[in-house]
Amino acid sequence: MKIANKQISAVSLVKEAFEKARQFAKYNVFVSLADEEKALKKAEEIDKKIATGEEVGPLAGVPYALKDNFLSKEGNTTASAKILEPFHSPIDSTTVKKLEEAGAIMIGRTNLDAFAQGSSTENSYFGPSHNAKDFDRVPGGSSGGSAAAVALDIVEFATGTDTGGSIRQPASFNGVYGFKPTYGTISRYGVVAMASSTDCIGFFTKNAEDMDLLMSICAGQDEKDLTTLPSFYNHEEQKYFVPEIAPKSAKIGIIKDFRNDSIDPEVQRVLDSQVEKLKSAGHQIVELDMPTLKYALAVYYIVVPAEVASNLSRYDGIRYGYRSEHAKNLSEVFGFSRNEGFMPENKRRIMIGNFVLSSGFYDAYFKKAEQARTLIIEEYQKAFEKCDYLLTPVSPSPAFKLGEKVSDPVAMYFEDVMSVPINLAGLPSLAYPAGESQDTKMPIGLQLIGQRRSDKSILDFAKYLAKELN
Ligand code: GLN
């Protein structure tokens, strides 16, 4: 991000980003492109300021892509769902506001699984996006458009949301960095809600340095989101939460329970080789038993649909976007609009969510799941008494073929087996490119997980890994 030192003009960068977006149109990365004239005008103003020595923000003139579940006054927000069409937001989300204040320029809104529900970006009303490295494969999901936009080098960074892996898995599938911060680090205000107790805002970048910069700009308490934590990211006090560690002597935890037959051998090989590198650089590897993690996927697919059912109840054919033309009375307005406006996966979750919350089933499913969630949280706390970071795969396999899993929801849910426990526990986790599959050459990411509020320390460790180890 080197505009302020005049190596390159903002106008030429923004122009190039729009050109590339058009050049890669067949990847279906964008739901809509921003108003090019307006974007260029913003860039011109930044170039003028730089020329006259005026102060500019830390992201001055940097083109970025916005996952289309962030509200912005520019253009329409769709969340890749028909039921929001057309929805023009009267407000900017806090993240958009902060990015724009820092000088970043939005190029387009990226495709996602409708309402961020999915692991492949195939559940989009606008059709699937494609993997940046192999057109026949999925880019991962739900933030597949954002990950591919960065991997195709259309933009410097993109926003994402991660409720159960939607930043980390597409980052891993496309060979870029994807960060899910500690729950509550970045405001969720103005982001279309999926599951409010695990939704997190984060980014895709090409390196850990840019991620650090974006975090320092966007993290912080927001009176409009009461779950945001008091600012810690930029504060020295963060050290209080982070074990005092020099990167040279870190203790890295490896989860034994994740070593099993359902993991693609290539993913295991990349993890093993990273572990060997860490060992020979003098780090300590700690093998951990974490038996409750095997319940995480089941817990997630009870808790999240319950919250989804509640959050999606506001789309009634009246207050937002789409209304069915076939409805003849009020009940049909609700029923037909929801039936025609939601994607099948949205409906599946609404059904499951209402089921697990209904009287008679609440105790057996939702309450049990929340109790198991507490055990998962405690298991991580115990793990971090023995190590500084955990290192695990992001998902069991590299990017799969388009169409391979879309009609098998359980196979698709299994994609999330190693990402969702982290959301249930609210922990920070960075997916970083760690290798590739030998036969298909598809990228394979690993995730570096820390305890709550160790976000900066994770990114610092990732900078070190990129410089010294990989
Ligand atoms: N793939 C997961 C799901 O479908 C995660 C989605 C997300 O993080 N938004 O629930």
Image (tube, rainbow, N blue to C red):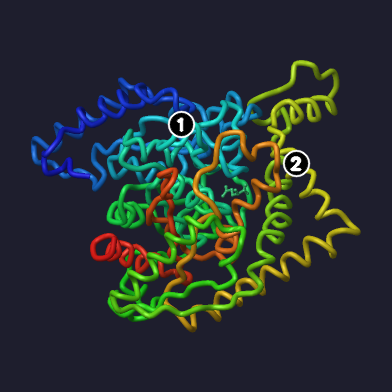
Identify the residue at image location x=51%, y=65%.
427
* Callout 2: SS: helix
Density class for disc 1 (Cα within 10 Å; few <14, some 14-19, many ≥20) is some
For label 1, the residue is 135
Mark nearer the N terminus (2 vs 1): 1
Amino acid at pointer 1: Phe
Q: Position of residue 111 (x, y in %)?
A: 50, 33
Q: Residue at x 45, y 59 (%)?
A: 181
Of residue 27 and residue 275, the one placed in the foreground of this image is 275
Q: Judge depth for marks 2 and 1 and give the one in front.
A: 1
Regarding residue 99, the answer to whether it shows in the image is: yes
- Point out residue 400 in the picture as x, y percentages from the top left corner: 54, 42
* Marker disc for residue 158: none
Question: Residue 258 versus residue 439: which sits nearer the camera?
Answer: 439
- Location of the C terminus by quadrant is bottom left
Rendering coords of residue 116 (x, y %): 58, 42
For the point 46% across and 46% down, the residue is: 173
Q: Do the residues labelled 2 and 1 touch (CB within 8 Å)?
A: no
Judged from this view, the residue extending furthest toward the bottom is 385
Residue 221 visible in the displayed image: no
Q: Name the residue under label 2.
A: 348
Estimate the spatial distance between the alpha carbons at disc 2 and disc 1, rounded to whole Å.
28 Å
Disc 2 residue type (three-letter): Arg
